Image (cartoon, coloured by chain):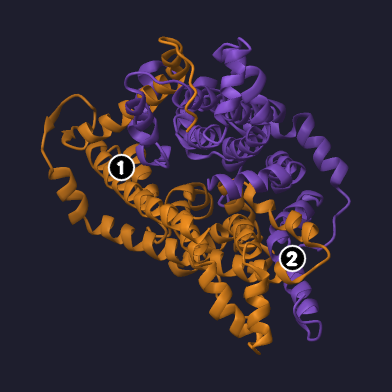
Chain colours: A orange, B purple
Amino acid sequence: MPKAVFPNRFLPYLLLAPQVAITLVFFYWPASQALYQSTLKEDPFGLKSKFVGLANFAAVLGDPDYLHSVRVTVVFSVSTAVLALALALFLATAAEKVVRGKAFYRTLLIWPYAVAPAVAGLLWLFMFNPAMGTFAYLLRDAGYRWNPLLDGDQAMVLVVVAAAWKQISYNFLFFVAALQSIPRSLIEAAAIDGASSTKRFWTIVFPLIAPTTFFLLVVNTVYAFFDTFGIIDAVTGGGPAQATQTLVYKVYNDGFVNLDLGGSAAQSVILMAIVIALTAVQFRYVERRVHYG
Amino acid sequence: MIERRGIGRPVAHLVLVLGVFVVAFPIYYTFIASTQSLTTILRPPLPLTPGGEFAANYGEAIFGGIGRIGGVDVLTLLFNTLVMALGIALGKIFISILSAFAIVFFRFPLRMAFFWLIFVTLMLPVEVRILPTYKVMVDLGLIDTYAGLILPLIASATATLLFRQFFMTIPSELVEAARIDGAGPLRFLRDILIPLSRTNIAALFVILFIYGWTQYLWPLLVTNDNQMNTIVIALRKMVSFADADTPWHMVMVTAILAILPPVLVVVLMQRWFVRGLVESEK
């Protein structure tokens, strides 16, 4: 931190004013409203509401639909993160090996990052919807009963693939950066000692990029939790029969479609707690990573 | 290279080519579909090479075709999305530079309190507080306005933290020299700090532009009037698999138009984007 500072009484407050004002109005106000709302029970017309303490939380956590949604979210997030990380790491190790064409491959691999989640969902649905999708047609031709609009497991596979596809670019860039920071001398020394390239990968490279992998695991989980609303809405709308209704989708559905304000607010508060926990985990890691250099 | 012998490198190329194929295919498929006639699209499998309807489809879409389906001209949709993406990118960069500048280069009462006030918003996405934020929008009369689309999404600390981190690496001597030469704080900000932050600003601009362009849930909630829709929302509204009348060739063109601007930004500003992404860690 620079020791030299400007002596000024009012200017710093003036400089902070825009961000603080926006943060108060669009963050603290709604967040406190969510907390307050989560302790109230309102009739559907919004005319009366009464204080019910933690009853909304009890109702949410005791609701089999909510617990089902928790399971769906866990399956969805873990599958998406693992698939996106594995493919990206595989591609990044290949990109480390090539000498020519690195920039060319990278340019083509970062496209999905720029595609909106809702559009990404539609692209995959175009290819795999039973009515006109080419791949649905090929699957049916091969004798496979493919209909993600009716079969919950198939719907889940489709949203996981679409969500992972969008995240590959991001993970790829981080893995490439991590792989480049590994000292060549370590790998050369192992090669001289006769370690095969597979062995070098698992005993040297993989442990050294573990901090990056862990960081990406958190980021991918946060992504799967919150940024995939568009994908799910475009591909399945949470269906069939709630098979792909994640927690964020349920907050939206209960709040805006079913107008259960107290329940939706309680769900919002639970989600905030989850994000704060994930952020805390990430920060612990960021501090640790400094030592790895 | 460690091993000259072996099959490592050709295999690596093969893996990358396959990877590129898988990653780029959905976009390529949509592009192919956007150059076919409606009847070809409805009769799978789709050919793997562009059809002959490129000019016809894109011409129809841009000159009123999309407008006839959703009631809103495609240029209006693209304009709305552009305003939203630019508003978020520039707005967030603007307020973040100012607040990071205040926190790093001044000492004043409650400095750390303000820092934590901003810091807490880190990574808490608008998705988790949609309903209360929506109510705030209604109370403030911001439904169907550009301000309503933009402001809630710039209430986050990520950019502020990035600038704070960078400003803390600025040597003290620079500040002292500026003060000796009689430059006030605003002059220092304009003539020294902002030019030095150019690469950070460029990187952040790309990331935030993409973030703004690809928003879905928030614009869906905060716009009732179709005239205020973004292109992503309009595209979603056009698609109905139950409806036999969906004009798929127009849908495909709209999808390409929704994808193209952010992809161009990422590809053309790749150098800054990659640096910013990996260094700022989101």
Q: Is residue A36 left or right of residue B129?
A: left
What is the spatial separation of the Cα atoms under label 2 and label 1, in whole angstroms? 39 Å
On-image quarter of the N terminus of chain B:
bottom right
Q: Nearer the viewer, residue B236 or B190?
A: B190
Mark 1 falls within which chain?
A
Residue name at image x 23 percent, y 35 percent:
A35
The disc label shown at residue A268, or none: 1
The disc label shown at residue B102, or none: none
Check the image and report above or below for B20 versus A191.
Answer: above
Q: Which residue is mark 2?
A: B21
Q: Could you confirm whether marks 2 and 1 are on the same chain?
A: no
Mark 2 falls within which chain?
B
Residue name at image x 27 percent, y 55 percent:
A66
Q: Position of residue B187 (x, y in %)?
A: 61, 13
Identified by mark 1, the residue type is: Ser
Identified by mark 2, the residue type is: Phe
Check the image and report above or below for A90 versus B276.
Answer: below
Q: Is residue B52 left or right of residue B31?
A: right
Check the image and report above or below for A175 versus B138.
Answer: below
Q: Position of residue A12 (x, y in %)?
A: 44, 16
Q: Position of residue B58 (x, y in %)?
A: 81, 39
Q: Is residue B38 left or right of residue A259?
A: right
Q: Position of residue B48 (x, y in %)?
A: 81, 63
The local crowd at label 2, few if under 14, some if 14 to 19, many if 20 or more residues have their Cα within 10 Å, is some
The local crowd at label 1, few if under 14, some if 14 to 19, many if 20 or more residues have their Cα within 10 Å, is many
Please report contact status of discs 2 and 1: CB closer than 8 Å, yes or no: no
Residue B200 visible in the snapshot: yes
Q: How many marks?
A: 2
Q: Find numbered disc 1 in the image and state the secondary structure of the residue it sits on.
A: helix
Residue name at image x 86 percent, y 47 percent:
B53
Q: Find numbered disc 2 in the image and state the secondary structure of the residue it sits on.
A: helix
Q: Quadrant of residue B85?
A: top right
